[in-house]
Image (spheres, rainbow, N blue to C red):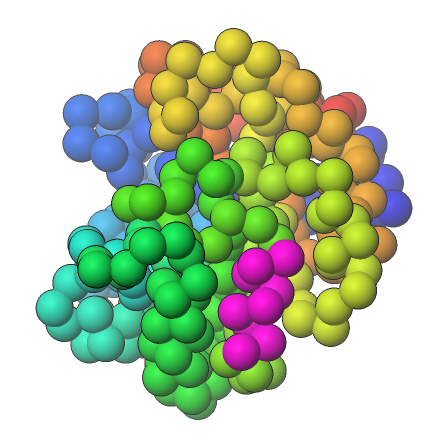
Amino acid sequence: MRDFSNDTSALALNTATLGHNLDGFGAGWSTERIIDACAERGYGGIVFWRREIGDRAVDIGERVRAAGMKVVGLCRTPYLTGSDVPENWADDAKLSIEMAAELGTTVLTIVTGGTEPGTKGIVESQTVLAERIAQIAPLAAERGVNLALEPLNPMFGGNRTCIMTARDAVRVCEMVGAENVGLAIDVYHVWWDTTLAETLAETNVPILGYHLCDWLEDTSDMLLDRGMMGDGVADLKALRAAVEGAGYAGPCEVEIFSAQDWWQRDPGEVLDVIVERFRTVC
Ligand code: ZN
């Protein structure tokens, strides 16, 4: 396993950790200020959300690289299944692919969306999902973008996801059968899964991203009470051993939705604590 005790080059910030991508939260730092604050602290990269980027993708990508970092990823495509799929999902997915390419990142995350209207269970939804990913994967490949399918914790089944385990995500990737489609593994969503290491070791589907946070023992909000690494009950070293054992050697992206705790703090403090925890507990 890689030694991070004195090396933060693999550390990336997912900007959701500073809260500003939900209205009414966060300290309101500009994208430029976030880039500089990460670079000063030795972060290796940043992951953005589309709403921060607007029409400035090329400029922001250049700014990140000029600061000595990489744009590690972009969140995310529109939902591809479920009741909340936008009517123009295919066009919107293309826009997200274009934005990723303009930012100069190779990873675009897919959060699938929920169960297809009129169906029960998740199998039919996964079939629809695979068809829709297959529809957008060639354009992404043309633009040098890989699509990272992120399984979500089962409690997000129904309205947010139809992929709840790494094993199901692997199966959907295999149904798509495109070289640029792989997995995003997020501690919050997989920490409970004792079959994770085995699933990842057995497949050739690539891991395209690894997301860090922690699962708090007494979590108070499913969506917005993620823990800082080290504050919860996830076995972070074992989880990283599982992804690295399967060949992953890429960035580790800190993604903490925390409305009542970390989003209330000064972003500089949050970024400092992340560095310290990354070096000691991840
Ligand atoms: Zn994630």
Residue 39 visible in rendering: no
What is the x, y in percent for residue 67? 51, 52
Which quadrant would residue 70 be assigned to in this image? bottom right
Which quadrant would residue 157 be assigned to in this image? top left
Q: Main secondary structure of the magenta part?
A: helix
The residue closer to the viewer here, 214 or 18, is 214
Q: Looking at the picture, does residue 64 appear above or below residue 88? A: above
Range covered by the magenta-colored residues: 167-175
Residue 194 visible in rendering: yes
What is the x, y in percent for residue 248? 74, 59
- Residue depicted at 41% across the width and 72% down the height: 127
Q: Is residue 236 left or right of residue 126?
A: right
Q: Looking at the picture, does residue 56 appear above or below residue 51? A: below
Q: Looking at the picture, does residue 204 appear above or below residue 117? A: below
The residue closer to the viewer here, 112 or 44, is 112
- Residue depicted at 67% across the width and 26% down the height: 234
What is the x, y in percent for residue 103? 39, 66
Which quadrant would residue 265 be assigned to in this image? top left
Furthest-left residue in view?
87
Q: Is residue 51 left or right of residue 41?
A: left
What is the x, y in percent for residue 242? 79, 48
- Residue depicted at 52% across the width and 10% down the height: 218
- Residue depicted at 24% across the width and 34% down the height: 22
